Amino acid sequence: MGTGIGARVKRKEDRRFITGKGKYTDDIRMENQAYAAFVRSPHAHAKVTGIDKSAALAMEGVIDVLDGHQLTGDGIGNLICGWAISSRDGSPMNMGAWSALATEKVRYVGDAVAVVIAESQALARQAAEMVEVSYEELPAAVFADKALQPGAPQVHDNAPGNLIFDWVIGEEEATEAALAGSAHVVDIDLTNNRLSPNPMEPRAAVATYDEAEDHYTLYTTSQNPHVARLVLSAFYQVAPEHKLRVIAPDVGGGFGSKIYIYPEEITCLWASMRTQRSVKWTGDRSEAFMTDAHGRDHISNVKLGFDADHRITGLKIETIANLGAYMSLFSSVTPTYLHATLYSGQYVIPHIFGNVKAVYTNTVPVDAYRGAGRPEACYMIERAMEVAARQLGVDPAELRRKNFINEFPYQTPVILTYDAGDFGGNLDKAMKAADVAGFAARKAEAAARGKLRGMGYSCYIEACGIAPSAAVGSLGSGVGLWESAEVRVNPVGTIEILTGSHSHGQGHETTFAQIVSDRFGVPMENVSIVHGDTDKVQFGMGTYGSRSGAVGMSAIVKAMDKIEAKVKKIAAHQLEASEDDIVIEGGEVKVKGTDRKLAWHEIGLAAYTAHNLPPDMEPGLKEGAFYDPSNFTFPAGCYIAEVEVDPDTGVTEIIQFTAADDFGTIINPMIVEGQVHGGVAQGIGQALLEQVVYDEDGQLITGSYMDYAMPRADDVPFYTIEHNTTVCPSNPLGIKGCGEAGAIGAPPAVINAITDAIGTDALSMPATPQKVWMALQSTASLQAAE
Amino acid sequence: MTQVTLTVNGKSVSRDVPDTMLLSEFLREELRLTGTHVGCDTSQCGACVVHLDGRAVKSCTALAVAHSGSAVTTIEGLASGKTLHPMQEAFNEHHGLQCGFCTTGMIMTGVDMVNRYKAAGKALTPEAIRKELEGNICRCTGYHNIVKAIEDAATRMDGMAQAAE
Amino acid sequence: MDMTGEYRIGAPRTEVWAALNDPAVLKACIPGCEELDKTSDTSFEAKVVQKIGPVKARFAGTVELANINAPESYTIQGEGNGGVAGFAKGAADVHLAENEDGSTTLSYEVHATVGGKLARLGSRLIDSTATKLATRFFEAFQAHLDPEAEAPRSDEDETDAAAGPSA
């Protein structure tokens, strides 16, 4: 099958990882390196009344102890949210100030108040314990619904009632009227549980200030080093962009949590200037739980109306979104434009209205986490559809099928225009692979063993690529969402691809090389991918929102178009043929229908020797491109979960998980399936295991892997993966994206399956054995009472 | 400070280190063998697994001084020159890794698991692999391909054992 | 976290009350107490070492006596800062009732909270640890006043005896 588009090429990057030679941020050691440890608030909400550094400063090997007053005094700016959202009354969102080191007030457990710089990590941590911070405790607002109630503690003075914005989408009156005229309305309250992203590599930063050049270098665990540099420069005033190099080397997973620029990176850069030392900070898992942006945390009410023929009439969703103590970089767009624009799901819904209230609480900031707003939307729609089927007494697959959108393009009532899809085909493939026909027999067999077997569907759709820059700009984005690429053909014909995308597990070094190999017939090993360094790649928007394929690779294709044009000109000139007759095949550049040809490397050499180029042609063979999508992409699919519940213990076992996805063109099925596996596991984690817990005082009590249940190998099954491809019409490769689908589609499939098994819909995520058992007891007692 | 002497990947090394230094820290900071990763602080994630006198241990839970005189194999010592260990090959073959951070611990755990099952004459089924991976967390792969890789490596390691005989 | 308990002490109420106000007795009975210095008639400064789950810390803090209704009841409240381990604070309403046989029944209601690393890493263990600490305090207190009473249960455990990673 070779190495072209569609081939299951083994990953080029694996060798360094499987031999322990990967280079992660914490593996980097600079000369003259010192270590940072942060002094963090143990209180959820308190005034900082004093910081006594004397004991720490007196310790041998402590270089400095720095606080927020010094930081702001040096002109370091506050952290910002990069997407402006307005309330329904037109007023702008209420963004409270966020200093990298708190000055007057701390607003969540873990909020940094000072940093110790010392000769060793152990010493820095010991000294951090010696910094005495005096606090005047304040009552804390912890839960989003309570934070909105009158008299709740105020997190930020400029967000009265803790309300950040009160945002609406769609048509309120028409939707209310549609619901009022419906034959049946499903009305359910749903909670989307708060999660901690947990990439296995904790965040880290190594900052170096070069006084002679007045230049900074930052190695950091980032999904988007260029965005980091932009924000560090333009907003946090650490250094102008040309004086700041940001490098994201090997990064051990991100899932959204490494998009943001956190206080620690800012502080390390500033401290390196202050102390004239390289400053390294490596977070531990406890700090990751405390300070990495959390995900989800929505409380919602869903009303879904049907006519007598079981066609959807309207959908109304009201949501309270907890954004934590400060507005993180994309916190505002995650529960709004990345979320409510997907309320139509895969269905024809004539009228939709959504209202999202975003709320400050004394908890760590909440931002995009794998799926980012779309899992929350999908969960509501797919739970509501399943509940509707149960209430209407119809087959859940057929209820979905009856309401599917079948004609494209389809304009939803909530902004988006779906460009292509085959929802019925996805459902068919999934049902066949999951052997839905044989389910009744399996259920009976399970019952004979005393087990409750259930099946649940989820037909998800997501909007990926995060697209046209002008469109997102009109919706409040502070940045453009294009991608850049540069293709450099060397004199010997080898190729370097510089990309603004960043790989932290996605396999770009392989997939990106595949499309180049496919296009020019150059062997894979002659193509290398350069990414993650602002000194090498001019600019880029990074990797999130399943955008590296649809947007990042499209930019590479555009740059390859330009290379191809120049190659053809050179070949036509040298082979004395018409450009139109030149073809590139199998590593050769040929004149169609003749035996005249040049080897690929001969073109490279010709371009750089420049001895015989067409008149007026510049030497060299290097082209760049910026690609700005014309639309979002719309990956969609159907997931079916089959579970068995043990009624004695409430333990759920996932027997079978089937995914039929439509990701458009697939470059490397092996890698795409790996993305689905990982996404589904995170979705199963959300459905069964994971929950960040704060107590009523705002203390984080899931602060380690002892208390936060990560999915482990025996919590998940082998997955069955099917593909059903409709090509995406808006980008040159026809790619839709695959990184988030699993995390979006899996939770409702699992919960729909469990609720099917236990016979009640009163079950929230995570469906722990205790909750499932309790739900079973309540249905048992109801049945007994009947 | 106490002198610690270890045989690491076949070479004898000696360092004066604080009594509080963890084996993971000794390997990463003293020997600069950075393939051993630290992913948590409660001995749960398994990214730091190395072989200590032939047994898999979490090096973040072992004090360096407590093991002076022992032999340690880290991920860097698993391959024979340019020839990868069958477990490493299988992880590549089955796409058993994505970001690579948990991978080194997974591979070391996988090798130990296969060795133990072989020594006990027990079959290493997928179910057994999943149970044995209780102490190793991966956030990227959903475990599907890790289980496949270890299962396949067990077969490949049979070949290796036979070739050695 | 809330808990309640009751002890019958074979000593008259006035004696029990006096002991409850005696720093030396309190120091001897508070598990892990290293120092307890009286700073006024109703306040003390204390240093206490505790281990809760994986977190071991030396707490420096204050103890205040309030709502004093001698010799019947008071509220003993304290807060301690364990540095990077976090903090703990709590209050116990202690009530003494005279029994017909001349003994005294001591009853208490405690409300306590913890924060920081203690909450993050040790929260699963807070309830059981706190119950154990309260039990040990009151059993020691009972034994001090009433050596004849049944010996306290021997539940010397890892709470402060065993070595562990310190915070």
Image (cartoon, helix red, strand yellow):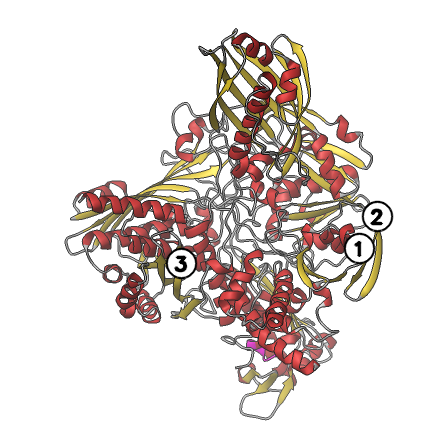
Q: For the C terminus of chain A, which image quadrant?
A: top left
Looking at the rendered structure, the secondary structure element under dot 3 is: strand
**In the picture shown, does residue A764 fall above or below A398?**
above
Looking at the rendered structure, the secondary structure element under dot 2 is: strand
Identify which amino acid the numbered label 2 is placed on.
Answer: Thr
Q: Nearer the viewer, residue B157 or A81?
A: B157
Chain where mark 1 sits: B
Name the residue at 49% across, 60% down: A714
- Residue A677 x, y percent position in the rendering: 47, 63
Give the residue at mark 2. Answer: B2
Q: Nearer the viewer, residue A301 or A535?
A: A301
Point out the tag, 2 or 1, that comes first from the N-terminus. 2
- Residue A605 x, y percent position in the rendering: 71, 78
Task: Answer few, some or many: residues within 10 Å of disc 3's Cα (few below 14, many 20 plus, some between 14 and 19).
Answer: some
Residue A141 in sight in this render = yes
Name the residue at 54% across, 59% down: B140
Give the residue at mark 1. Answer: B68
Tell me which segment is drawn in magenta.
A518-522
- Residue A594 x, y percent position in the rendering: 57, 93
- Residue C164 x, y percent position in the rendering: 67, 40
Tell me whether circle 2 and circle 3 mark residues in contact (CB < 8 Å).
Answer: no
Chain where mark 2 sits: B
Name the residue at 36% across, 33% down: A89
Identify which amino acid the numbered label 1 is placed on.
Answer: Ser
Looking at the rendered structure, the secondary structure element under dot 1 is: loop
Tell me whether circle 2 and circle 1 mark residues in contact (CB < 8 Å).
Answer: yes
As for residue A27 lying within the magenta part, the answer is no
Residue A418 in sight in this render = no
Task: Answer few, some or many: residues within 10 Å of disc 2's Cα (few below 14, many 20 plus, some between 14 and 19).
Answer: few
Give the residue at mark 3. Answer: A653
Q: Nearer the viewer, residue A461 or A434?
A: A434
